[in-house]
Image: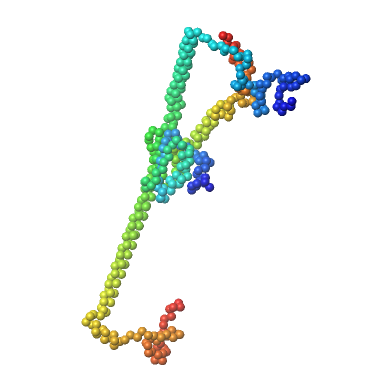
Amino acid sequence: MFSAVKSNVVNVGRVNRLWLPLNDVTVTLAGVQSVRRKRKPLWLPPAKSKMFKIPPRKYIPEEESRELLRLYNNYRTQMKIIRRHLKNEVERTAATSELALQQAAEEEAEHQALMEYNLQENLRVAALREKRVQKEFEAEMARVEATKKYQEERALLAEEEAMRIITETQEFAKSFIKREDLEQAIETAIANPVDYNFAVDNEGHVFRGRLTKPQDTDEKDWEKLPATAMQ
Amino acid sequence: MPFMKGKAPIRRTLQYLESSRLVLRDRVKVVMINYNIHGAHHEGARDFVFWHLPQLQYKNPQVQVTTLKNMTPTPFMRIFFENGEDVLVDVDSKSRTDIFDHIKKVFCKSDTKLAEEKREAQILDNPGNFGWGCDRQCICEVPGQVPCPGVIPLPKFMRGKYKYGQVDE
């Protein structure tokens, strides 16, 4: 019978003998370590030799057990007392010991010094801030002044402009034709017709009037248009 | 990229947060900073909040750090201590680095103290210990020590029931 499983059972002359003096209770763990199992698996039934075994029950007489309990209780109470006492001692001395007090005092001093430094810094920054605010205030006032001046100038100009318009219109109003002078004005207009016709030649001489001819006036009296377009 | 959120995502990196030295002293409990969003003299405070506040909170998770915006014309910080007293820090027209240095000097643990605390922590952390939270769970894991009795039973002379004799009924 060929088995792929490595077994401690060896066939010696048709009789199976165990090769190693082990009870097949070794198991390899990950091939690295052999485990000797501590107890039999739970699913195996009890062995024949143990079938009717009654586990012995310890009997301690009542007085003895009471005495034991009393002794144990006393012992445990005393241990607790000692431990608690020592703990309290440690806590007490830790807070009021010289080293702790010294450290606390040092920390306080350091804190005070730092608060002092902070105060100084605050004062310094406050001074700078005052200056900045002052400057900003002055700049603001200057700006306001400038705006006021500008507004004043603008108002003045507007006034002047208004006065100019008024005087111009007054002048203009003088040339209005009144109702009484209407017929007279019509007659003058008919008597003096305005001729808007004109002619222009290549050299820029302008000849005003519908019936004007270039031959009518001398060449040196011809009107020349101002040459401003090509400049 | 889903993790590079915000204006300067470097502020969210662990390396940036860990590298900060702004560990506040034990007595500091609340840090309050007041500043405006606009204004040249608030610029330092704004930058400080933008760059260093995450670091401050990371290093001091038990301290309350709050920002109040657009409430006063000048920026300032208010630090509250354990005993209830509070301290004002004027940061008007100060630059970011100035504020940082000032806070570090006045309210944080100094570098020497931090180094000391780190050293103490290392001393407590004895590599020879075993158990929960240590490198080894049990001394039986170390080669050369007695192997685990749960795996290999102890020899009889080390076992109590054989040393002190089995109790007969």
Residue B73 location in percent, x, y?
A: 37, 47
Q: How many labels sit on residues?
A: 0
Residue A154 location in percent, x, y?
A: 32, 65
- Report whether A105 appears left or right of A28: left
- Residue A27 versus residue B81: which sits nearer the camera? A27
Occupied quadrant, residue B153: top right
- Report whether A141 appears left or right of A84: left
- Residue A62 versus residue B83: which sits nearer the camera? A62
Residue drawn at (26%, 84%) of the image: A185
Residue drawn at (26%, 77%) of the image: A173
> From what the image shows, is residue A192 above or below residue B111?
below
> From what the image shows, is residue A40 above or below residue B78?
above
- Residue A4 versus residue B47: which sits nearer the camera? A4
- Report whether B132 appears left or right of B40: right
**Quadrant housing the N terminus of chain A:** top right
Farthest residue to the bottom: give it: A215
Residue drawn at (26%, 86%) of the image: A187
**Quadrant housing the C terminus of chain A:** bottom left
> From what the image shows, is residue A92 above or below residue B77?
above
- Residue B169 versus residue B15: which sits nearer the camera? B169
